[in-house]
Amino acid sequence: MDILQKLEAALPIGAIRDAEAGYLEEPRGRWQGQALAVVAPSDVAQVSTVLRLSNETGTPIVPYGGGTGLVGGQIKHGGKAPILLSLERMNAVRALDAEAGTLTVEAGAILHDVHEVAEAEGWIFPLTLASQGTARIGGLLATNAGGVNVIRYGNARDLVLGIEAVLADGTVIEALSPLRKNNMGYDLRHLLIGSEGTLGVITAASLRLFPKLSAVGAALMVVPTPDAALGLLRLAQARIGEGISAFELIGRMGFEFLREVGPEVRMPFENAPDWSCLIDLGLSHGAPEAALEALFSEAYEAGFVTDGVVAQSEAQRRDLWAIRENIPQANRRIGSVSSHDISVPVAKIPAFIAEAPRRIAEINTFRINCFGHLGDGNLHYNVFPEKGRSRADHEAERAAIKTCVHDLVHDMGGSISAEHGIGRLKVGDLERYGDPGKLAAMRAIKMALDPNGILNPGAVLRE
């Protein structure tokens, strides 16, 4: 029997279906994938069966969460067609401990739904990003997702107490314990989180919850330069400390793209500022508005800010966040020539922002939209065609632009993948910029856990 016949004999009716187009397209439209079929198990035992049979037959497995990944980790577009393993039916809440602040959910749970479950019990799960309405927990952990609240709560890795996972041969790792202290041997949780489905398939996780904050607020402050933005960040950290939930840098082009192609949002300034910082606070006591107004006054005296608006209601706070959250959608409507998810040491961000356009200008004339999570050093640095031209006009220059940006990031001690992962898009970059010793260790781990190379082949490491 071939693999599909074996799976049909072993799994219940409805677990296997044709690979529809929606599963085979990545969000930026650069790649079209392939699959023998979509297999959607409903429990961990079925996942184990799928992996065991695939391992025995040498059939590739591509784990699939919400399909929102931007580096091609969920798309296999060449070589032997895989089984696309979708965790969408494994979306149950297995346990919630409202006393300890832990939530155990299956990998197919959608992030927005996890937020609602936690908040109904007076807690929050702080991982927050633009795709939270479709992104699933398994994919978020597989890529160690970041989002806007990293400055306060950390990456996805920092929000997980335990996991359940299945290895390539079907072995189930049952390590869902929500214990905060557990030193019983190697921490396989942190090995599998961020491995992008190349070492095992995460099927469930015990998540850390945090107390719901009594008061939240936001402000958008205009800064004259990225150096001033850093001064504002340091001042905010000194005055407000852990009350800062997010600190976002927004360049002028983000405002201009929203005005050019939408989505339509409320603009707080008549003229788009060259640089501005969106600051979000969450306090257990005190008034965020007063804290932000005091911060603005002190920052204004220090020359860090020139203008700003402090939200006076939750509706105004949402309006300010709508600017930041809709910039990626405006970017997609314009169509980037080359997009970069990078991080550099926070102190070097102004130098990077100053130098990168000069180097890119040696290739051609472009528009640059620079924005991102200044508080943790993560920038989305995206290069776009001039008005009247399209990204297709610059296809031949895309590789040179990416190399230009990534070389500078590497020279500054940064990372060419801050929060989106490596996937298939950045395998060559990992080889170019990664530490040889680390790469050798990664290949050894891959060989030990997946000797037949069935788990997401071609992602992170070459086949």
Image (tube, grey):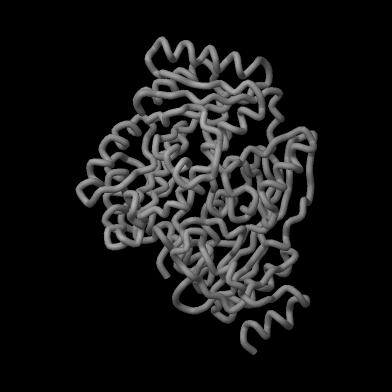
- Viewer can see residue 154: no
Residue drawn 44% across and 64% down? 30
Q: Position of residue 389 (x, y in %)?
A: 33, 55
Residue drawn 50% across and 65% down? 448
Q: Position of residue 281 (x, y in %)?
A: 59, 25
Name the residue nearer the viewer: 101 or 117: 117
Residue pushed farthest bottom? 1
Residue 264 figure quarter? top right
Residue pushed farthest left? 362
- Please identify the quadrant where the C terminus is shown: bottom left
Count of all numbered marks drawn on residues in the image: 0
- Please identify the quadrant where the N terminus is shown: bottom right
Residue 50 figure quarter? bottom right
Against 151, is 300 above or below?
above
Against 287, is 328 above or below?
below
Against 347, is 424 above or below?
below
Against 172, is 254 above or below?
above
Name the residue nearer the viewer: 119 or 162: 119
Q: Position of residue 424 (x, y in %)?
A: 44, 63
Residue drawn 30% across and 48% down? 366
Residue 99 figure quarter? top right
Residue drawn 57% across and 29% down? 245
Q: Position of residue 56 (x, y in %)?
A: 59, 79
